[in-house]
Amino acid sequence: MLFAEMLDEAQTWVAGNQPIVVGGSVALLVLAFLAFTVSRRRRHLDPEELAIAHANARTDENAMSWAPPEQSYGDRRGAVRREGQPVRVLLVSTTFHNGAGDGYVIDRSTSGLKLATQSAGPPGMTVQVRAVDAPDTIGFVTVIVRSCRKNDDYYELGCEFETPPPWNVLLLFG
């Protein structure tokens, strides 16, 4: 049998059995890919390369688990925090020397405020807060101090609203 006759018979068989030919071709490609992948994995690493790979893995692991305190605190928040222009507020509490003080709202959300004040407040303390520019018809809002941090010459009080105020009062804080 001549080569031309064999080629002609092969073409006729392929035309009649296309699904088998396509499936066989895909199977051969998959096997070639797997053989190539396995041969790359069997490559021998010398001890220096292993030590470098191990050090890189530990560094990547430490980098993945480390988060700055500001970010981890922000991740626990249930409401979106907004910064903006500081808003002056009046503060009333029994722990202040005269019973009253003043400060600024430096950060706000629908669930609380961050206040900058001259005096510290222990966590758990309740404070009455009112914007200085608020109309006389708007009363004080009660907040609970959740954190107190010294920042240069003032204290930052992280406060949570005892009960969320209405929007018209919340907007007065900036």
Image: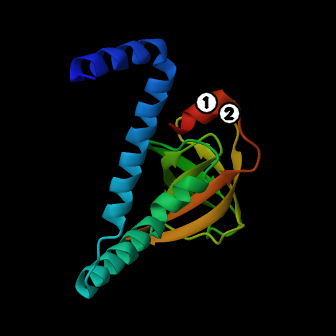
Label 1: element kind: loop
Q: Residue 138 got which mark?
A: 2
Please tell me which residue is depicted at 64% across the width and 72% down the height of the picture. 122
For this rendering, which residue is in front, 62 or 40? 40
Could you tell me residue 136's position as x and y percent?
65, 32
Q: CA distance from mark 1 to mark 2?
A: 6 Å
Q: Identity of the amino acid at label 1?
A: Pro
Q: Is residue 105 above or below residue 167?
A: below
Quarter of the view holding residue 26:
top left
For this rendering, which residue is in front, 72 or 164? 72
Q: Does the residue at mark 1 contact the one at mark 2 (Cβ under 8 Å)?
A: yes
Could you tell me residue 21's position as x and y percent?
44, 25
Q: Residue 91 got which mark?
A: none
Please tell me which residue is depicted at 41% across the width and 18% down the height of the picture. 14
For this rendering, which residue is in front, 102 or 56? 56
Residue 54 visible in this rendered orientation of the protein: yes
Q: Is residue 170 above or below residue 72?
A: above
Crowd tier of the residue under label 1, counting other residues whose Cα lies within 10 Å: few below 14, some 14–19, many 20 or above: few
Q: Residue 135 got which mark?
A: 1
Residue 134 visible in this rendered orientation of the protein: no
Label 2: element kind: loop
Quarter of the view holding residue 36:
bottom left
Q: Is residue 143 above or below residue 151?
A: above
